[in-house]
Image: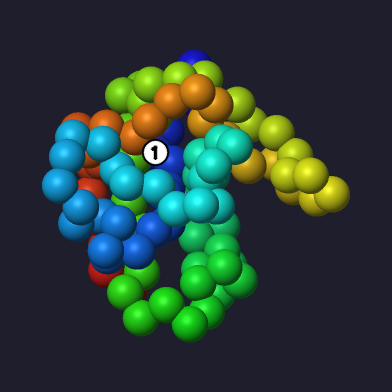
Amino acid sequence: MYTNPIYKITTKDLWEQNGNTLKLSPMDENFIHFAEADDVDRIVCKFFPNEQNVVVLKIDPTKLTGKLVKELNPGGSREFYHLYGGTIPKAAVISFEML
């Protein structure tokens, strides 16, 4: 099992929703997308270019529910972590940074 932190990029609105699990965007409908530290800036620029309130969550993967898999994105050449059939408990968040 992967034990190094992984990162979830989201918005302030979703991060601040009440509840014990992170509210997800429609991008995470089929599986939940994660990044490794060296991918965060590139992903923020690519998928959140017009978002004023981006939040980067540092996640302890051992506290996630579901099946965490590192795999190629469809049509891509790089592997990313995807979580199937699970959620992100807010207790899995080690720290967060508002961009």
- Residue marked by disc 1: 5
Circle 1: residue type: Pro
Provide residue 92's location: percent of width, then percent of height: 26, 33
Give above or below for 44 relative to 19. Answer: below
The quarter in which the C terminus is drawn is bottom left
Give left or right: position of 16 versus 66. left
Residue at the left extreme, as displayed: 18
Q: Residue at x 63, y 31 (%)?
A: 70
Give left or right: position of 40 versus 79. left
Look at the numbered disc 1 and give the secondary structure of its residue: loop
* Circle 1 Cα neighbour tier, 10 Å, few/some/many (<14 / 14–19 / ≥20): some
Q: Residue at x 52, y 79 (%)?
A: 49
Q: How many marks?
A: 1
Please state which of residues 1 and 43 is positioned toward the viewer in this rendering.
43
Q: Residue at x 73, y 44 (%)?
A: 73
- Would you identify the image quadrant in which residue 9 lies? bottom left
Give left or right: position of 81 versus 92. right
Provide residue 95's location: percent of width, then percent of height: 22, 49
The answer to whether any part of residue 50 appears in the image is: yes
Provide residue 36's location: percent of width, then percent of height: 51, 47
Please state which of residues 25 and 8 is positioned toward the viewer in this rendering.
25
Provide residue 41's location: percent of width, then percent of height: 51, 68
The answer to whether any part of residue 38 appears in the image is: no
Give above or below for 65 relative to 14. Answer: above
Q: Residue at x 44, y 41 (%)?
A: 6
Give above or below for 96 relative to 32. Answer: below
